[in-house]
Image: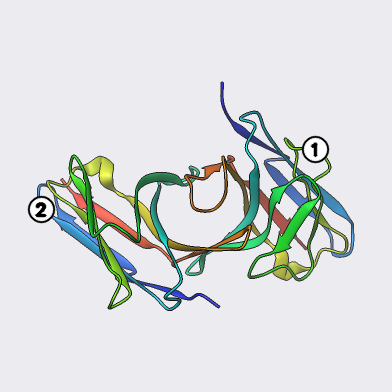
Protein backbone atom coordinates (compact mmCIF):
# COMPACT_ATOMS: atom_id res chain seq x y z
CA UNK A 1 0.00 0.00 0.00
CA UNK A 2 0.87 3.68 -0.04
CA UNK A 3 3.58 4.99 2.29
CA UNK A 4 4.26 8.67 2.86
CA UNK A 5 7.50 9.92 4.38
CA UNK A 6 7.96 13.49 5.56
CA UNK A 7 11.07 15.49 6.43
CA UNK A 8 12.17 17.16 8.57
CA UNK A 9 10.24 16.13 11.67
CA UNK A 10 11.02 19.48 13.31
CA UNK A 11 11.96 22.78 11.73
CA UNK A 12 12.87 26.06 13.34
CA UNK A 13 13.21 29.27 11.31
CA UNK A 14 13.60 32.96 12.01
CA UNK A 15 10.60 35.14 11.28
CA UNK A 16 10.74 36.32 7.68
CA UNK A 17 12.78 33.36 6.45
CA UNK A 18 11.43 30.60 4.22
CA UNK A 19 10.48 27.09 5.32
CA UNK A 20 10.44 23.98 3.15
CA UNK A 21 8.92 20.63 4.06
CA UNK A 22 9.38 17.61 1.80
CA UNK A 23 7.32 14.47 1.37
CA UNK A 24 7.82 11.32 -0.66
CA UNK A 25 5.21 8.73 -1.56
CA UNK A 26 5.48 5.18 -2.81
CA UNK A 27 2.36 4.51 -4.91
CA UNK A 28 2.66 5.94 -8.42
CA UNK A 29 -1.16 5.75 -8.71
CA UNK A 30 -1.60 8.49 -6.09
CA UNK A 31 -3.19 11.52 -7.66
CA UNK A 32 -4.07 14.03 -4.95
CA UNK A 33 -1.66 15.60 -2.46
CA UNK A 34 -3.06 17.86 0.28
CA UNK A 35 -1.27 19.70 3.05
CA UNK A 36 -2.90 20.21 6.43
CA UNK A 37 -1.92 22.58 9.22
CA UNK A 38 -2.65 21.73 12.84
CA UNK A 39 -2.19 24.41 15.45
CA UNK A 40 -1.63 23.34 19.02
CA UNK A 41 -4.78 21.81 20.46
CA UNK A 42 -6.76 22.36 17.28
CA UNK A 43 -8.05 20.20 14.46
CA UNK A 44 -6.14 19.81 11.15
CA UNK A 45 -7.17 22.23 8.41
CA UNK A 46 -6.38 22.13 4.71
CA UNK A 47 -4.03 24.90 3.60
CA UNK A 48 -3.23 23.88 0.03
CA UNK A 49 -3.51 20.88 -2.26
CA UNK A 50 -2.25 19.78 -5.64
CA UNK A 51 -3.36 17.19 -8.17
CA UNK A 52 -1.18 14.97 -10.29
CA UNK A 53 -1.77 16.93 -13.50
CA UNK A 54 -0.21 20.09 -12.03
CA UNK A 55 3.44 20.75 -11.17
CA UNK A 56 3.08 23.75 -8.91
CA UNK A 57 0.40 25.70 -7.09
CA UNK A 58 0.62 28.94 -5.12
CA UNK A 59 -1.61 30.70 -2.64
CA UNK A 60 -0.10 33.92 -1.30
CA UNK A 61 2.90 32.90 0.86
CA UNK A 62 2.32 29.18 0.42
CA UNK A 63 3.29 27.03 -2.54
CA UNK A 64 3.38 23.34 -3.26
CA UNK A 65 5.46 21.61 -5.94
CA UNK A 66 4.99 18.08 -7.24
CA UNK A 67 7.49 15.86 -9.03
CA UNK A 68 5.59 12.77 -10.17
CA UNK A 69 8.63 11.13 -11.69
CA UNK A 70 10.54 11.26 -8.43
CA UNK A 71 7.36 10.78 -6.37
CA UNK A 72 7.91 13.70 -4.09
CA UNK A 73 6.16 16.94 -3.27
CA UNK A 74 7.10 19.91 -1.13
CA UNK A 75 5.50 22.72 0.82
CA UNK A 76 7.14 26.13 0.64
CA UNK A 77 6.26 28.92 3.05
CA UNK A 78 7.85 32.31 2.37
CA UNK A 79 8.14 35.28 4.71
CA UNK A 80 7.26 33.14 7.69
CA UNK A 81 5.32 34.65 10.58
CA UNK A 82 4.85 33.46 14.18
CA UNK A 83 1.31 32.36 13.34
CA UNK A 84 2.78 29.85 10.88
CA UNK A 85 4.04 27.87 13.89
CA UNK A 86 2.15 24.56 13.82
CA UNK A 87 2.41 20.94 12.80
CA UNK A 88 2.12 20.39 9.06
CA UNK A 89 0.97 17.11 7.54
CA UNK A 90 1.31 16.04 3.94
CA UNK A 91 -0.90 13.29 2.53
CA UNK A 92 -1.39 11.23 -0.57
CA UNK A 93 -4.69 9.93 -1.87
CA UNK A 94 -5.36 7.24 -4.44
CA UNK A 95 -8.80 6.86 -5.91
CA UNK A 96 -9.41 3.21 -6.68
CA UNK A 97 -12.75 2.37 -8.28
CA UNK A 98 -15.22 4.16 -6.02
CA UNK A 99 -13.23 3.99 -2.79
CA UNK A 100 -10.78 6.57 -1.50
CA UNK A 101 -8.02 5.95 0.95
CA UNK A 102 -5.69 8.64 2.24
CA UNK A 103 -2.28 8.24 3.87
CA UNK A 104 -0.77 11.01 5.97
CA UNK A 105 2.87 11.67 6.64
CA UNK A 106 4.08 11.75 10.28
CA UNK A 107 4.09 15.54 10.44
CA UNK A 108 6.58 18.40 10.70
CA UNK A 109 6.57 20.69 13.71
CA UNK A 110 7.43 24.18 12.48
CA UNK A 111 8.51 26.87 14.92
CA UNK A 112 8.88 30.44 13.72
CA UNK A 113 11.07 32.47 16.05
CA UNK A 114 10.13 36.15 16.30
CA UNK B 1 -22.82 26.74 10.61
CA UNK B 2 -21.17 23.99 8.55
CA UNK B 3 -19.36 21.69 10.90
CA UNK B 4 -18.30 18.24 12.03
CA UNK B 5 -19.08 17.41 15.64
CA UNK B 6 -17.77 14.63 17.85
CA UNK B 7 -18.85 13.39 21.24
CA UNK B 8 -17.52 12.97 23.79
CA UNK B 9 -14.52 15.29 23.58
CA UNK B 10 -12.74 13.55 26.44
CA UNK B 11 -13.20 10.02 27.73
CA UNK B 12 -11.41 7.93 30.32
CA UNK B 13 -12.46 4.31 30.44
CA UNK B 14 -11.26 0.89 31.51
CA UNK B 15 -10.07 -2.05 29.47
CA UNK B 16 -12.90 -4.06 27.96
CA UNK B 17 -15.75 -1.61 28.49
CA UNK B 18 -17.49 -1.02 25.17
CA UNK B 19 -17.72 2.56 24.03
CA UNK B 20 -18.97 4.60 21.10
CA UNK B 21 -17.67 7.92 19.83
CA UNK B 22 -20.23 9.73 17.74
CA UNK B 23 -19.52 11.84 14.68
CA UNK B 24 -22.00 13.99 12.82
CA UNK B 25 -21.72 16.41 9.89
CA UNK B 26 -24.29 18.87 8.56
CA UNK B 27 -22.72 19.51 5.14
CA UNK B 28 -24.40 16.63 3.26
CA UNK B 29 -20.97 15.12 2.62
CA UNK B 30 -20.76 11.70 1.01
CA UNK B 31 -17.38 10.74 2.49
CA UNK B 32 -16.61 10.31 6.19
CA UNK B 33 -13.53 8.95 7.87
CA UNK B 34 -11.98 8.22 11.26
CA UNK B 35 -8.34 8.84 12.15
CA UNK B 36 -6.23 8.34 15.20
CA UNK B 37 -3.35 10.66 15.98
CA UNK B 38 -0.36 9.49 17.97
CA UNK B 39 2.93 11.37 18.56
CA UNK B 40 5.41 10.77 15.76
CA UNK B 41 2.94 8.74 13.71
CA UNK B 42 0.76 11.46 12.27
CA UNK B 43 -2.84 10.74 11.35
CA UNK B 44 -3.64 7.13 10.59
CA UNK B 45 -6.89 6.21 8.92
CA UNK B 46 -9.03 3.68 10.79
CA UNK B 47 -12.15 3.34 8.61
CA UNK B 48 -13.81 5.38 5.92
CA UNK B 49 -17.19 5.45 4.27
CA UNK B 50 -18.06 6.58 0.77
CA UNK B 51 -21.81 6.59 1.38
CA UNK B 52 -24.61 5.12 3.46
CA UNK B 53 -24.02 1.42 4.16
CA UNK B 54 -20.63 1.59 2.39
CA UNK B 55 -17.59 1.33 4.65
CA UNK B 56 -14.02 0.16 4.16
CA UNK B 57 -10.92 -0.40 6.25
CA UNK B 58 -8.16 2.14 6.50
CA UNK B 59 -4.65 1.37 7.65
CA UNK B 60 -5.34 0.56 11.30
CA UNK B 61 -8.85 -0.98 11.58
CA UNK B 62 -8.08 -3.67 14.17
CA UNK B 63 -10.14 -3.29 17.33
CA UNK B 64 -12.61 -0.83 15.80
CA UNK B 65 -16.01 -1.00 14.15
CA UNK B 66 -18.03 1.61 12.31
CA UNK B 67 -21.47 1.94 10.81
CA UNK B 68 -23.06 4.35 8.33
CA UNK B 69 -26.80 4.02 8.62
CA UNK B 70 -27.44 7.70 7.92
CA UNK B 71 -25.51 10.06 5.70
CA UNK B 72 -24.76 12.54 8.48
CA UNK B 73 -23.57 10.10 11.18
CA UNK B 74 -20.53 7.86 11.35
CA UNK B 75 -19.99 6.42 14.86
CA UNK B 76 -16.78 4.71 15.91
CA UNK B 77 -17.24 1.67 18.14
CA UNK B 78 -14.64 0.08 20.37
CA UNK B 79 -16.14 -3.24 21.45
CA UNK B 80 -13.37 -4.11 23.92
CA UNK B 81 -10.99 -1.17 24.34
CA UNK B 82 -7.37 -1.82 25.24
CA UNK B 83 -4.66 0.56 26.50
CA UNK B 84 -3.02 0.68 23.05
CA UNK B 85 -6.16 2.42 21.80
CA UNK B 86 -5.39 5.41 24.00
CA UNK B 87 -5.14 8.18 21.44
CA UNK B 88 -6.60 11.35 19.97
CA UNK B 89 -9.36 10.52 17.51
CA UNK B 90 -10.57 12.71 14.67
CA UNK B 91 -13.60 12.30 12.48
CA UNK B 92 -13.56 13.99 9.08
CA UNK B 93 -15.86 14.44 6.12
CA UNK B 94 -15.56 15.61 2.55
CA UNK B 95 -17.95 16.23 -0.29
CA UNK B 96 -17.03 13.43 -2.67
CA UNK B 97 -14.05 11.51 -1.35
CA UNK B 98 -10.49 11.63 -0.07
CA UNK B 99 -9.49 13.58 -3.19
CA UNK B 100 -11.30 16.61 -1.81
CA UNK B 101 -10.74 18.83 1.22
CA UNK B 102 -11.52 16.99 4.42
CA UNK B 103 -13.20 18.86 7.28
CA UNK B 104 -12.16 17.59 10.66
CA UNK B 105 -14.10 17.41 13.89
CA UNK B 106 -12.64 18.83 17.12
CA UNK B 107 -11.18 15.52 18.24
CA UNK B 108 -11.85 13.04 21.05
CA UNK B 109 -9.14 12.37 23.59
CA UNK B 110 -9.53 8.75 24.72
CA UNK B 111 -7.64 7.16 27.60
CA UNK B 112 -8.00 3.44 28.28
CA UNK B 113 -6.61 2.25 31.62
In this picture the colour scheme is rainbow
**Callout 1 crowding tier (Cα within 10 Å): few <14, some 14–19, many ≥20:** few
Residue B56 x/y as whole percent? 72, 62
Which numbered marker is on residue B70?
Answer: 1
Q: Position of residue B20 (x, y in %)?
A: 82, 48
* Image quarter in which the C terminus of chain B is found: bottom right
Tell me which chain the residue with mark 2 is part of: A
Question: Compared to A24, does B28 lie above or below?
Answer: above
Extreme-top residue of the structure: B1
Residue under the image location 87 percent in, 64 percent down: B80
What is the crowding at mark 2: few (fewer than 14 residues within 10 Å), some, or many (at least 20)?
Answer: few
Determine whether, in the image, residue A96 is placed left or right of residue A58. right
Which one is nearer the viewer's eye here, B81 or B31?
A: B31
Gap between marks 1 and 2 measured at Cα = 48 Å
Query: Residue at 22% of width from left, 43% of height from top?
Result: A82
B93 vs B7, nearest the viewer: B93
- Mark 1 and mark 2 in contact? Answer it, CB < 8 Å: no
Quadrant in the picture for the N terminus of chain B: top right
Residue on which disc 2 sits: A17
**Image quadrant assignment for residue A92:** bottom left
Residue in the picture at 40% in, 54% down: A34
Provide the chain ID for the residue under circle 1: B
Amino acid sequence: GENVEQHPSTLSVQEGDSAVIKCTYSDSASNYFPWYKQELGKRPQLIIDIRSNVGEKKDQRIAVTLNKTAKHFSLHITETQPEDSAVYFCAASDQKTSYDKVIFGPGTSLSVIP
Amino acid sequence: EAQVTQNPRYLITVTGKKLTVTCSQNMNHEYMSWYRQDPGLGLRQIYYSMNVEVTDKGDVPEGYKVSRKEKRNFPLILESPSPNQTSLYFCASSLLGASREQYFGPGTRLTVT
